[in-house]
Image: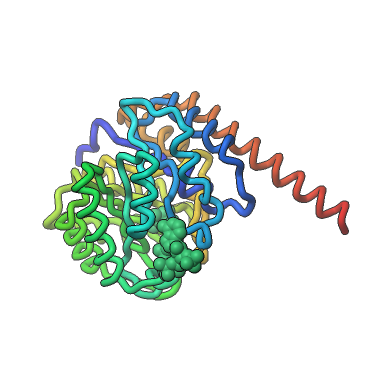
Amino acid sequence: MQLPKKVKIVEVSPRDGLQNESKIIPASIKIDFINRLSETGLSVIEATSFVSPKWIPQLADHSEVYQGIKKHHHINYPVIVFNKQGFENALAAGVKEIAVFTTPSELFCKRNANCTVKESLERIKEITQLAAMHHIRVRGYISCVLGCPFEGAIDPKLVEDIAKQLIDLGCYEISLGDTIGIGTAGATHTLLKTVLKNITKNVIAVHFHDTYGQALANIYVALEHGIHIIDSSVAGLGGCPYAKGATGNVATEDVLYMLHGLGVDTGVDLNKLMDVGCFITTYLERENRSKVSLAKRLS
Ligand code: HMG
Ligand code: MG
């Protein structure tokens, strides 16, 4: 099977990565981080989430960060929105693209969004209608597509059904999230065979967390299915505070190394991206070291 010649990387570290850090990172660091990412050749950088600060305090500075970053005309900076309130705040901040969330798992939906799956789709309907009025593009996330921390196995047909509904509601792209990194190459193949029966591969992205080191193998399977949109996170940052076991996303550096080795074009400069990875991990390590030394002094 022929692999895609070109892949679009959706860099999710400023959102998926920083939402999972225990310490609150200053907005100035986030802005510097995103500005550096913008110089690497990426075409999509998920900047933040306009969610409730009570639920995700790490991203409470969403408006400041979004408004503070230097926007490049060839780069999209989507943000996650869970409800009308988030949409209105994003709109006020000048956001041009959003991402919405749902999942086939009732229990994960309740834990992560405090609603049923049906209610999450109703929220998405309301958001996509508002987005259309304001010419804002909407990307759809489906989480726990390869397994849920609360419900276990997930039927691929449920994923296919939700993907179709999201497309009907106006999402231009659907990102399939292996939220807890439980997927294997075999499970990824089965899922994509089902999802791609009636949906074009051109609108499907994959979003792997790398809990069991399977993400690159799963991405290779996705490439074999013709998927050419991959979510990843510099330095493998990431995780969802409401999904036990959700460790880091697949590292963008690893994805680029594999893709470039396969002769697949990404438009991203691996060396520049590694420098940005060093920038953010150096910052996070310094913060963690000072936390440890403070704890020692206090003990
Ligand atoms: P709720 O508690 O049911 O919300 O949470 P509510 O409507 O009852 O409101 C409660 C309070 O929150 C109110 O304030 C609202 O004003 C406020 P109060 O009256 O108590 O002072 N509030 C907000 N404030 C600011 N911005 C908002 C907002 N909404 C409500 N947008 C809600 C429902 C959806 C808000 C909550 O469940 C939530 O914020 N969840 C977000 C969880 C999250 O961000 N998870 C991580 C992202 S998803 C992920 O990581 C997976 C992904 O990476 C893919 C994968 O890996 O699979 C995408
Ligand atoms: Mg994620």
Residue 115 position, x and y percent, is: 36, 72
Quarter where residue 105 is shown = bottom left
Q: In the picture provided, is 277 more to the left or to the right than 174?
A: right
Q: Examine the rendering and report whether any part of residue 2 can be seen.
A: yes
Residue at x 48%, y 33% (from the top left corner): 68
Q: In the orientation shown, which residue stands out farthest toward the left? A: 198
Quarter of the image for the N terminus: give it: top left
Task: Identify which residue is drawn at 19% across, 47% down.
Answer: 133
What residue is drawn where x is 42% and y is 51%?
50
Q: Could you tell me residue 44's position as x and y percent?
A: 35, 36
Position of the C terminus, as image quadrant, is bottom right
Q: Residue at x 44, y 53 (%)?
A: 209
* Nearer-the-camera pick, 259 or 240: 240
For the rendered model, the colour scheme is rainbow
Residue 255 lies in quadrant: top left
Q: Nearer the viewer, residue 216 or 93?
A: 93
Q: Is 180 located above or below residue 14 in the figure?
A: below
Q: Is residue 145 left or right of residue 200?
A: right
Residue 113: image location, x then y, percent: 40, 66
| In this view, 12 is above or below 198 | above
Residue 231 spot, x, y in % from top left: 37, 44
Instruction: In the rendered view, tell whether residue 124 sits above or below residue 218.
Output: below
- Count of labels in the image: 0
Q: Is residue 181 visible?
A: no
